[in-house]
Amino acid sequence: MRGRRNSTRSRTTGWSMSNWKIPLTDLDYGDEELHAVQRVLRSQWLSMGPEVAAFEREFAGHCQIPHAVAVSSATAALSMALAVADVGAQDEVIQPGLNFVAAANATVQRGAEPVFVDVLGLDEPTLDPRQVARRIGPRTKAVVAMHYGGRLCRMAELAELCERHGVVLIEDACHAVGVSTEAADGGDSFAGGIGDLGAFSFFSNKNLATGEGGMVVTRRDDFAERLRPLRSHGMTTLTWDRHRGHASSYDVAVHGSNYRLDELHAALGRVQLQKLADNNRRRRTVLDFYAARLGGLEGWMFPLTTDQPTSGHLMVAVAPDGAVRDRVVADLRQAGVQTSLHYPCIADFTAFQDWQAAELAMTRDFAQRAISLPIFPTMTEQQVDYVCEALLATPASEGNGN
Ligand SMILES: *Cc1c(COP(=O)(O)O)cnc(C)c1O
């Protein structure tokens, strides 16, 4: 079996981080990242400074979004986005019940209420604009749209709706770094820069990985001006400015926090940004390999193998029912294939029982039936074969399609 190659050995170190034959995700790290870290260490400056500034400039340039503010995580980015949207007590933030929990937690931490709405369907698991239209009201301050798996939400409809109601549109673009679509003016618009504010994560399993880190982006000058101080205690100057003698004191103008990124992570981010377009392309090729093997499988759906623009962040299979899903997950584990679920329904978590939403039928069905299969830029066609053969060998999924 060719799939036996141990894919968890990183190119750089040869260390094996797990015993999976095929892990869910794998870094594309090499000498470039090592050299970037060495450059920072030699500079003897570790906290937010020139590397962070360069990373922000390069990221903004790559995504054609005027303002990019580097932060320590996407959770920080989402908190800051909600803050500049003036989300506070008694306000409502409409968001998908199918998402990572960060946006919902950030909403509650601002004293506001998450209003969970359903996704369009099992084959398009992003925010349903009609559901948003039904729930939008006088207390709605913001809508959070999440580009599931790297496939864009129906942004034109959502943007029109938010504009009409004077509501801030925030993109949780963690899955969609570097994804662009044709804009109304014929140019490109990039995920994160379509709405009013966008949040990205550079956690280890994301398409642009630095370990921890994130970015908040905006086209709006007024928002950018308010974001920067929020990242560093609301202070009007940085340690770096004072180090260079550009400032000797500071004022505190707003109540900020410490959401700063550091130089080491920024240096890694700059290297990963250079690899991003190629790696997203390689992920899309992996999606095509999956589509060719599983495409016609009866009763199954593959919402992310589409012709739409995508980052290829996830490869998700939706099983005919929950029982088949559970059997396939168990069989894949037996075969050494790591899987995951993106995501359980947020409204069903204990901490969210005050906001339990009845109308999340599609989200809950998806959570019962979805499997995230391995996908990463260095994944080979043989590895995809191995995963698909294991999936197709499970009773009740065999004999169809292939
Ligand atoms: C990873 C992720 C987050 C959180 O990112 P952190 O950088 O870990 O805070 C939020 N939303 C989505 C959709 C994510 O995938």
Image (spheres, rainbow, N blue to C red):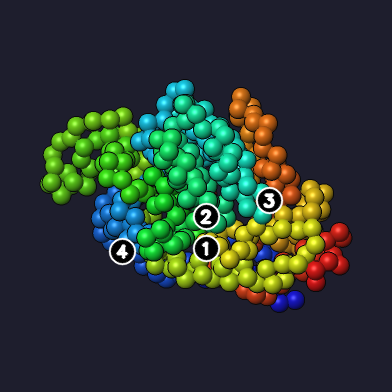
Helix, strand or loop under label 3: loop
Nearest the viewer among 120 and 38 is: 120
Q: Which mark is residue 122?
A: 3
Where is residue 333 drawn, in percent x and y?
75, 57
Q: What kind of residue is marked 1? A: Pro
Label located before the other in sequence (2 or 4): 4
Real-space Cα distance between discs 2 and 4? Answer: 36 Å
Image quadrant where one finds the C terminus = bottom right
Nearest the viewer among 157 and 256 is: 157
Helix, strand or loop under label 2: loop
Nearest the viewer among 392 and 155 is: 155
The residue lying at 53 percent from left, 51 percent from top is 153
Where is residue 44 drawn, in percent x and y?
26, 55
Label located before the other in sequence (3 or 2): 3
The residue lying at 69 percent from left, 72 percent from top is 292
The residue lying at 30 percent from left, 53 percent from top is 66
In this image, 343 relative to 166: left or right?
Answer: right
Give the labeled residue for mark 4. Answer: 39
* Quadrant in the rendering for residue 234: top left
Label located before the other in sequence (2 or 1): 2
Q: Quick check: can you spot residue 123?
A: yes
Image marks 2 and 1: residues in contact by CB distance under 8 Å? yes
Farthest top residue in view: 90
Q: Which mark is residue 152?
A: 2
Q: What kind of residue is marked 3? A: Leu
Give the labeled residue for mark 1. Answer: 309
* Quadrant in the rendering for residue 18: bottom right
